Amino acid sequence: MRIAPLVLAVLCSAAAGRVSAQPLPTSATRSATGAADQPARSYDRQFEVLEKKIDDLEWRARTEDIAIMDKWWITSPKPARTNNPTGQGAGNPLKIPVYSFTPKGLGARKAPLLILIHGYVHGSFDRYYSHILRELLDQGYVVVAPEYRGSTGYGAELYNAIDYGGAEIDDVKAARDWAVENLPNVDAARVGVLGWSHGGYLTLFQAFNYPDAYKVAYAGVPVSDLIQRMGYKGPGYQETFTQFIGKSAIDDPAEYRRRSPVNAVDKLRIPLLIHTNTIDEDVNVMEVQHLIEALTAAKKEFQHKIYDAAPGGHEFNRIDTRLARESRKEIWAFLARYLRPGT
């Protein structure tokens, strides 16, 4: 299918670099938390649906030589907030989209499964991850990428259902369970989870909350401590999270602690690798250091590496540099130790 280059550039340019854990500016997040949606924002949601359809065409083009790509809709817990809680269908489960990529040539053989969680608040599984996905497929993994609640590209309902540190965690687990039950090539005994930034945050909660569901986890530059994060991010960020969570960290610190992985480290029972960078401009290294210190104090077995001034900042090992490729090789070796791809 041929698409005019100019149209492709206009529709997809915004999607190419959404990797930050930083939320959108406050003016763009009000509708995501149940406030009145402005016409301009409603238009943006429809534009994003079109953008996502273009993105899916590109996904197929970039993976069709090595994988069978499918996109599915599954169910997860109902939204935490709704404009009409007594309306028809208000208690129904939320429907979320899930990508699956199965390496070609598997036949009837079983393969390990990796749940690859996208980052960015109101982000999506876009083509930024294409090189990472291909590296995983080349090793023989089945890869599943959930578009958890709050993801962009599926209209206002999914976008507005954002539940930071809440039911989005259930969405990822639902995708894992669906894949194990429905994808014939998946070995249920070999499932891992990984992500960067907000994806790393959700990876930590998968590892802590569902240790029987995963064999291994990797969290890159993960958001770890919302209380600490509110302090160093400042008033604008604090206001955004007040709308995400319903109260400020000052008004309800217990809720922010509950939604912070650093306070759940005692539940770790699976191998975990953590990476951070001293010049991360988004998730400050001190936030991840606090996580590392908490895991150490809890006497948990895990691995970590603090990169010193690695070029690329927050994205240092997701870009295409020698250091990034070497770092990813370390990640893949760590995962392979427990998941044994290719066997």
Image (cartoon, rainbow, N blue to C red):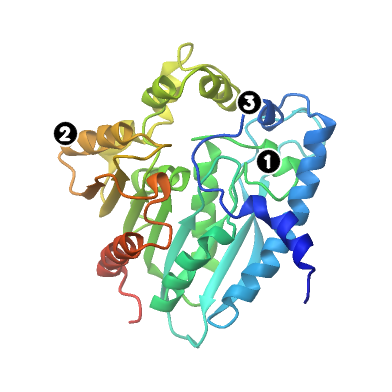
Residue appearing at x 78%, y 55% in the figure = 50
Apparent side of residue 8 relative to residue 116 in the rendered image (left or right): right
Placement of 72 over or under 87, stated as above or below: below
Q: Is residue 266 above or below residue 138?
A: above
Q: How many numbered tags mark residues here?
A: 3
Q: Which residue is mark 2?
A: 297
Name the amino acid type tagged 3: Thr
Residue type pointed to by label 1: Tyr
The image quadrant that residue 88 belongs to is: top right
Query: Do tag 3 and tag 1 residues touch (Cβ < 8 Å)?
Result: no
Q: Which tag, 3 or 1, sits closer to the chain's start?
A: 3
Q: Earlier in the sequence, mark 2 or mark 3?
A: 3
Image location (x, y in percent) of residue 299: 15, 40
- Residue 183 seen in the figure: no
Q: Determine which quarter of the picture holds residue 69.
A: bottom right
- Write down the residue under mark 3: 26
Tell me where residue 229 appears, x and y as whole percent: 40, 27
Q: Earlier in the sequence, mark 2 or mark 1?
A: 1
- Is 331 left, or right, of 143 in this rendering? left
Disc 1 target residue? 159
Query: Which quadrant of the figure contains the N terminus?
Result: bottom right
Q: Under tag 1, what secondary structure?
A: helix
